[in-house]
């Protein structure tokens, strides 16, 4: 923004061009924010763009565009949900950033109402939580609809999802109007956000950028069961349509909301003057860091509802309320080093080590650098003077490098291609930003997490090997890798002697481990904790490859790019190239293969039954494909035949049940004829395999 010329110096032509560009840019940012739940810039940057747009429009009123960001609100509803028209539009709020701005807001209110310059104003101050606003419709006291804001006129009908929130009553307690729209904010606490992201990471799913996105992503799930599993909170704070008056002041309205059974933010407070509002702003700013949820300012609302009605709206903002935003907390400091941390799932995360600096009352000595692309994009170098900002996010960010202060010898940062914790290769999977350590089973940074997963339900399911025990045993060197678990029997006495243990519990643990020496292949594969190989994928792999030995051999063969084993792996229905790549990377690491073999020697890994085996006409048949198939590749044909329980080989023998003849079939067709083996055309093969009924 700083490089844009002052608005006062703009020519009409330059203003028109900039308004056109701003309309496009803000629309794009809105879509990223509202539809994809993935903001591209910080709120401060967004607000600055909007402020610039408004300033240009104010100077050139004739140039205000039909698609001006000030004429639109948010974004149109996303596809996937039914639309719901709000009975009263859901509007937005104007922003102020300073005492002077707030005083100007108050002056505007007085002018509009024709009050004296020093007339008293009473407000309610409410922490402005960064979540997403929703509207709830109650008819005769019963919740009938719930919708997101959408474009302010129409939102997404998320009634089923909202019903899963404990803070939203299904019925209003006590007397209520026949019809009322109640509005408030759905949000996620910082702790619930961190726990959700940890869970997302464990499951190999995408992480949310901040609590607001996590809340939006959790609410806008087409399957309400997913919403129910997420911890969403809600505070009620506003009113839409109401069939009869419910209060005379906003403070009384909040009290009624509480009586009806809603959660109302306990920090909301009636403020009897402009001075009290200023004090409240300072109080909330001081409290901000300690709150369980992110706030980005305070909303001040004129308390008297009759005054609110008189004040009404100007464009998209009410004249009776304002959001007083906190300033972005920034400071300059020196970047002393870039450290690479290895997360529990193997992601290599660069962390900026800073000369400690006070940012808005908090001493900051570390900042997130996200990933290697981010470092390259911002050209961040050790020795640089950087600007750090604490926004809503928990971790401070580096927002800019001050190039003028760059030391002459500062070198571009080279991201390591080895894991700093275990020395294994660190690779980037196509389409991902993170570089990951491939030493899953041997990397100390990932060990405890991996071992816990290995022992968890769905995997080895070893009773008694929870997080605490695994961490203790790992730290004391009793177990270093998964195979060590099956060698614990030799340490039974040692375990019994540990604090908090005893002979009985040690014996029980050893017995629980022994009971799991026999394990179905699918569970074994899942237990390995290979990225993206969840329970479903593990089952697909098990059914496809059948035995541990076959799987291991095929994964080794798949190391060769262009090999049949590689293409087969990527063609297994439900697997695809991303998972195939993870498996290939896992096997490329020799130490992972060593762990597998160690385990295989200690365990009895049960073969898996082929998929859909029994009921297919080709189950158990020995099939050879030859020539060029026209409706699918040879690799797909093989994969799908195997999925139905057939065995596919390359050479024709007396034991062969069918030879499938593609175009230009040569010697194998002749051999089939010589041996009297049945041959099938591609079409006959499709019919027999049941593909034509798909
Ligand atoms: S009142 C017409 N009160 O801020 C008034 N909004 O920038 C409408 N917000 O979309 C909003 N806390 O998502 C109001 N106590 C509060 C709020 C609040 C957070 C959000 C809300 C709204 C946005 C406006």
Image (cartoon, grey):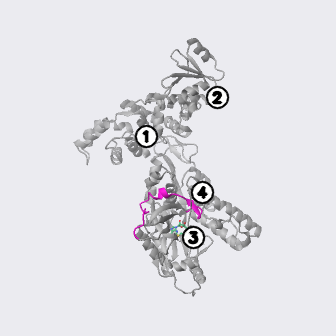
Vertically, is 295 above or below 492? below
Mark 2 or 4: the one toward you? 2
Q: For the residue carrying disc 2, how many other residues have a C-alpha within 10 Å: few (<14), some (14-19), or many (20+)? A: few
Quadrant of the image containing the N terminus = bottom right
Depth check, mark 3 against mark 1: the one in front is 3
Within the magenta stretch, is there residue 167? yes
Q: Label 2 vs label 3: CA separation?
A: 61 Å
Kindly identify which numbered label has been placed on residue 32: 4
Q: CA distance from mark 3 to mark 1?
A: 53 Å
Q: Which residue is mark 1?
A: 442
Q: Is residue 486 above or below residue 687?
A: below
Res 630 label:
2
The answer for how far apart the CA atoms under marks 1 and 4 are is 39 Å
**Magenta-drawn segment:** 149-174
Q: Say what secondary structure mark 1 lies in.
A: loop
What distance separates the C-alpha of mark 4 from that of mark 3? 20 Å
């Amino acid at each position: 923004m700083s490089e844009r010329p002052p608005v006062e110096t703009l020519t009409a032509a330059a203003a028109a061009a900039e308004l056109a560009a701003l309309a496009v840019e803000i629309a794009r940012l809105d879509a990223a924010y509202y539809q994809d739940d993935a903001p591209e810039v910080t709120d401060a940057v967004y607000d600055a763009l909007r402020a610039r747009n408004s300033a240009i429009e104010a100077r050139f009123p004739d140039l205000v565009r039909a698609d001006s960001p000030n004429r639109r609100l948010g974004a149109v509803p996303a596809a996937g949900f039914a639309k719901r028209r709000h009975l009263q539009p859901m509007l937005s709020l104007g922003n102020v950033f300073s005492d002077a701005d707030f005083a100007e807001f108050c002056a505007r209110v007085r002018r509009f109402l024709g009050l004296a310059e020093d007339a008293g104003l009473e407000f309610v101050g409410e922490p402005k939580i960064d979540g997403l606003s929703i509207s709830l419709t109650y008819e005769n006291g019963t919740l009938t609809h719930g919708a997101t804001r959408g474009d302010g006129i129409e939102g997404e009908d998320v009634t089923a999802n909202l019903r899963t929130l404990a803070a939203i009553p299904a019925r209003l307690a006590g007397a209520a109007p026949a019809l009322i729209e109640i509005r408030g904010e759905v949000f996620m606490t910082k702790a619930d956000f961190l726990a959700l992201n940890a869970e997302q990471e464990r499951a190999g799913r995408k992480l949310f950028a901040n609590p607001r996105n996590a809340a939006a992503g959790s609410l806008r799930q087409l399957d309400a069961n997913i919403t129910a599993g997420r911890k969403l909170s809600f505070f009620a704070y506003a009113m839409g349509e109401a069939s009869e008056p419910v209060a005379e002041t906003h403070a009384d309205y909040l009290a009624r909301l509480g009586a009806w059974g809603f959660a109302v933010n306990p920090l909301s407070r009636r403020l009897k003057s402009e001075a009290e509002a200023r004090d409240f702003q300072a109080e909330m700013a001081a409290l901000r860091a300690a709150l369980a949820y992110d706030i980005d300012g305070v909303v001040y609302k004129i308390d008297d509802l009759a005054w609110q009605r008189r004040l009404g709206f100007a464009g998209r903002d009410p004249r009776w309320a304002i959001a007083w935003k906190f300033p972005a907390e920034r400071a300059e400091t020196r970047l002393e080093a870039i450290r690479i941390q290895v997360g529990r799932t193997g992601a290599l995360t660069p962390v900026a080590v800073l000369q400690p600096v006070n940012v808005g009352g908090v001493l900051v000595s570390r900042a997130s650098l996200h990933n290697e692309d981010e470092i390259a994009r911002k050209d961040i170098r050790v020795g640089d003077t950087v600007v750090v900002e604490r926004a809503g996010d928990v971790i401070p960010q580096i927002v800019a490098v001050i190039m003028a202060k760059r030391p002459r010898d500062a070198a571009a940062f080279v991201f390591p291609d080895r894991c700093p914790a275990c020395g294994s290769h660190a690779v980037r999977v196509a389409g991902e930003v993170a570089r990951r350590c491939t030493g899953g089973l041997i990397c100390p940074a990932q060990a405890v997490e991996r071992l816990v997963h290995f022992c968890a339900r769905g995997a080895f399911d070893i009773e008694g090997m929870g997080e605490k025990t695994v961490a203790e045993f790992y730290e004391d060197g009793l177990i270093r890798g998964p195979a060590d678990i099956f060698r614990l029997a030799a340490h039974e006495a040692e375990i019994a002697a540990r604090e908090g243990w005893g002979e009985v519990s040690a014996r029980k643990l050893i017995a629980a481990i022994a009971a799991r020496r026999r394990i179905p292949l699918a569970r074994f594969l899942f237990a390995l904790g290979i990225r993206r190989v969840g329970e479903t994928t593990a089952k697909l792999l098990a059914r496809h490859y059948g035995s541990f030995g076959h799987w291991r051999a095929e994964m080794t063969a798949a190391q060769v790019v262009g090999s049949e084993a590689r293409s087969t792996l990527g063609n297994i229905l439900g697997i695809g190239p991303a998972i195939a790549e993870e498996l290939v990377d896992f096997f490329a690491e020799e130490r992972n293969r060593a762990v597998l073999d160690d385990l295989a020697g200690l365990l009895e890994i049960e073969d898996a039954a082929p998929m859909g085996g029994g009921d297919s006409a080709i189950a158990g048949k020995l099939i050879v494909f030859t020539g060029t198939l026209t409706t699918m590749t040879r690799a797909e044909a093989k994969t799908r035949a195997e999925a139905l329980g057939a065995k596919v080989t390359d050479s024709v023998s007396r034991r062969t049940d069918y030879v499938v003849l593609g175009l230009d079939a040569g010697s194998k067709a002749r051999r089939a004829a010589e041996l009297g083996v049945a041959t099938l055309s591609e079409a006959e093969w499709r019919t027999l395999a049941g593909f034509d009924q798909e």
